[in-house]
Amino acid sequence: MQKVTPRSEDYARWYTDVIQMADLATYAPVRGCMVIKPYGYALWENLQRSLDRRFKETGHENAYFPLFIPESFIKKEAEHVEGFSPELAVVTVGGGEVLEEPLIVRPTSETIIGHMFAQWINSYRDLPLLINQWANVVRWEKRPRLFLRTTEFLWQEGHTAHATSEEAEAETIQILGIYREFAEEQAAIPVTPGKKSESEKFAGALHSYTIEAMMGDKRALQSATSHNLGQNFAKAFEIKYLDTSNQQQYCHTTSWGMSTRMVGAIIMVHGDDMGLKMPPRLAPVQVVIVPIYKTDEERAAVMAMANETHETLRNAGFRVKMDNRDGLTPGFKFNDWEMRGVPIRVEIGPKDVQNRQVVLARRDQPGKEGKLFMGVDGLAENVSSLLESIHQSLFNSALAFQKANTREVETYDAFKEAVQSGFALAWWAGSREDEAAVKEETKATIRCIPFDQPGGSGKCVYTGKEAKEVALFARAY
């Protein structure tokens, strides 16, 4: 079986190898696009279901808006069009005729949803309006990378309208909390929540918030964002309501999203040189059963117990798969499922049948130390407990890695050294121009101003001025 390129040798090559060898996705014939294969799409569906439930529990409803957006809509919010213009795909011909107005292939939906909100909202009684959309978007990508940066990708985008700035801000922070909970409790990825700097915020937003995660190569990945748009889009699209005093007021709107780049995060945070390590709560297959036999007689006995085990685990609600492929050795199957990152492998051989036991192999603990012998009775409870243990193990490992590679720095020399191989926390009181200079000199950007601040003040790592905030810097995807 072909092996992946070791991470230490070429991390980017390792990443692509794992995606293709684990059957998650492959390159499409259109440059910058990808084909998400069934195993990769099953992971996305599990992610989607988990988030969708959380959105609905907080009162949001799903809707769908057109893929094509009139060019005039994009131009209505000046900062928005300036921010997105280099990434736009534009349709100028339709049905063999030149269009009267070019259409933009959806890069994000603030404009067209703003247009519709203006028609739907009349009174304070119509607020808050809480909408989410699961969709694809297109942003022309010059340096594509599977799941992380593709010209077309999948995501959810939430859009809400509120009567007051306080309500809009509360919505923005609430959603960021949902993203953080999802990342940590479902994907087993520790994240740093915080506010984006002025130069890093979403084009057209009042405030942008983010969750930032450290990947296995110590770079940052913006894993989800939540934006308080203030009244910028409301004024551009005339989203107004009559308040309780019968006065016309502009709404305060928000937008927020998480995309298929979270799949990339799962690969890079948890993966190793053997392939994926799927977080149990999102894994398309949580348990794989590998029957082991040589003779027809052994096969009959082993398969009877394997089928019994499969039925027991399936009825208990686990996502379980039986690997009864002929012509492949057990060793090949072990490697195949390790590559795919299945959390638990169940091995059943002739001796196991005699002893009414199975061997459970943990993906997060390779080798003999990750193997456990368990009786068939009570297997579902033991598997459940083991999956919880694996989730916590993955999270703890990622958190320890993040902490070990995050440095608090006071001098610019220490800062430059820190961002070459990890995160740097530093006092910051710089301007947009200072941020740009730091990026030019180090390739590091302010990932966020973390919510968790030390308090007090310190000396800005770049300007030497008094600073009241600590910023998180890193090189990023």
Image: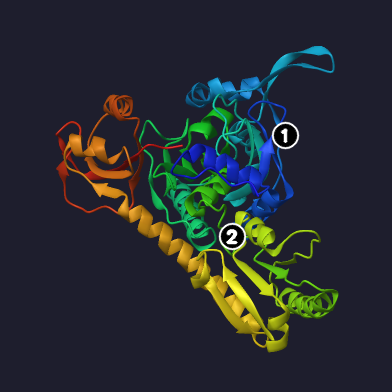
Q: Nearer the viewer, residue 239 or 65?
A: 65
Q: Residue at x 63, y 57 (%)?
A: 335
State the image quarter where residue 137 is shown: top right
Q: Residue at x 79, y 65 (%)?
A: 324
Q: Position of residue 2 (x, y in %)?
A: 63, 46
Q: Nearer the viewer, residue 67 or 376?
A: 376
Q: Using residue 204 as the reference point, say whether residue 45 is left or right of it.
A: right
Q: Nearer the viewer, residue 82 or 398?
A: 398
Residue 49 visible somewhere in the drawing: no
Asked if marks 1 and 2 touch (Cβ < 8 Å), the reply is no
**Which of the colour schemes (rainbow, by chain, secondary structure, one colour) is used?**
rainbow
Q: Secondary structure at mark 2?
A: helix
Q: Position of residue 270 (x, y in %)?
A: 50, 55
> Cα distance, mark 1 to mark 2?
24 Å
The residue to which callout 1 is attached is 66
Query: Eyeballing the image, is 45 above or below 203?
Result: below
- Mark 1 and mark 2 lie on one chain; the one further toward the N terminus is 2
Q: Nearer the viewer, residue 204 or 97?
A: 97
Q: Position of residue 160 (x, y in %)?
A: 57, 46
State the image quarter where residue 355 is shown: bottom right
Q: Residue at x 32, y 26 (%)?
A: 436
Residue 383 visible somewhere in the drawing: yes
Callout 2 amino acid: Arg
Q: Residue at x 69, y 60 (%)?
A: 333
Q: Secondary structure at mark 1?
A: loop
Callout 1 amino acid: Pro
Q: Position of residue 331 (x, y in %)?
A: 66, 61
The residue to which callout 2 is attached is 54
Q: Using residue 461 as the reference point, say whether residue 282 is left or right of it.
A: right
Q: Which disc, if any, is residue 164?
A: none
Query: Eyeballing the image, is 436 above or below 316?
Result: above
